[in-house]
Image: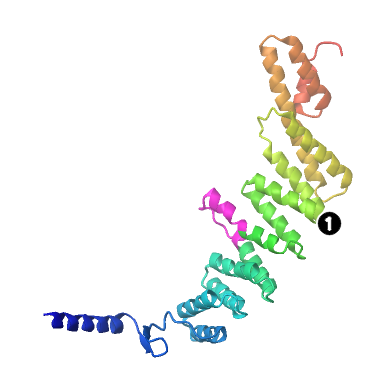
Amino acid sequence: MVQKQKVFFVAFFLVALSGFSYWEWTPETGRWINPKYAVKNTPEEQFEWAEQFRTRGKTQAAIREHKKLLKYYADSDYAPRSCFILAEIFKESGNNKESFNYYQRIIDNYPQSPLVSEAIKKQSVIAEESLERQSFHLLDLEKEKKGDMLATVIENHPYAEDSAQRALKLGQFYLEIKDYDRAVEVFTMMEERYTDPAIVEEARFYLIKTGYLLIPEVSTDPKAYNILKTKIENFLSLYPDGTHKNEVIEIRKHLAKNEAKRYFEIATYYERAGKKNSAQYYYKIIRDNYPETDYGKIAAGKINIAD
């Protein structure tokens, strides 16, 4: 009975070897090895082995073998090359996120590699394509993450020739999806980091625009208004003929209207409450500081005491 069990076990083992995977006996190690999991003796051999699969169109095998090189020969000169090839394979298959990550692996782990510059360029293309692709079905959090790749590209090479334009595009993207806090971070970084006058002007304009959008219409805090008004006056003083001059003036008008509205609501509240002096005090503020607004004109007609 015992002998039969042994025969059955050996037969089952052989069937398993032949039916599910291919194994080879290696005298050097004295054990069975599955070539699928084996690694070549040198990184060069492993790289060439992986590339043979790729040239024959066996993509999954090529991915497996290049990943194996990264695992066993991570410090070799072939490792960044395998990273780059994996990134290209995933890009071709439409997996932009995985492709981006392998390019990033080159930048993080192999900063001296001549492939770093090309990896950043490739990342930039992926990141900008991601921003331009319409994804109205995505949740807000997923939309915000779309900007993370371009933010990474900018930080990878902050003083690249086109880095400022990438930053501007990223800030505009955050503005578009109403992530105003991140937009402020990007435009502030642009103002502080870059020296090109045109870029600084763009950053200051968008800081004004974002700052205006950040103020709730029902806000009663004068601090935010005052900070923004100061930025507006400084901008118009520095760039009297700037590209965004008219837009800034328009923002100033809307800001004045909103601020006048806030004071007008306070004045009418006191008026309804029968507190005439308090109402008159706020109507005078509106008349003197916001004469061009509709609220200023109404307030002027409500003042019936001598100045």
In magenta, the rendered stretch is 130-148
User: Which one is nearer the viewer's eye here, 287 or 114?
Assistant: 114
Q: Position of residue 77 (x, y in %)?
A: 62, 80
User: Which one is nearer the viewer's eye here, 86 or 304?
Assistant: 86
Q: Is residue 230 above or below residue 13?
A: above
- Asked whether residue 240 is in view, the answer is no
- Asked whether residue 264 is in view, the answer is yes
Q: Is residue 92 left or right of residue 263?
A: left
All told, the count of numbered labels is: 1
Any magenta on residue 192? no
- Colour mode? rainbow
Q: Dot 1 corresponds to which residue?
A: 195
Q: Is residue 165 above or below residue 232?
A: below
Q: Is residue 281 above or below residue 132?
A: above
* Mark 1 residue crowding within 10 angstroms, few (<14) / some (14–19) / many (20+): few
User: In percent of the image, x 75 and y 25: which residue is there?
Assistant: 295
Q: Is residue 184 left or right of residue 297?
A: left
Q: Quadrant of the C terminus?
A: top right
Any magenta on residue 142? yes
Residue 218 falls in image quadrant:
top right
Q: Position of residue 116 (x, y in %)?
A: 67, 72
Q: Position of residue 32 (x, y in %)?
A: 36, 84
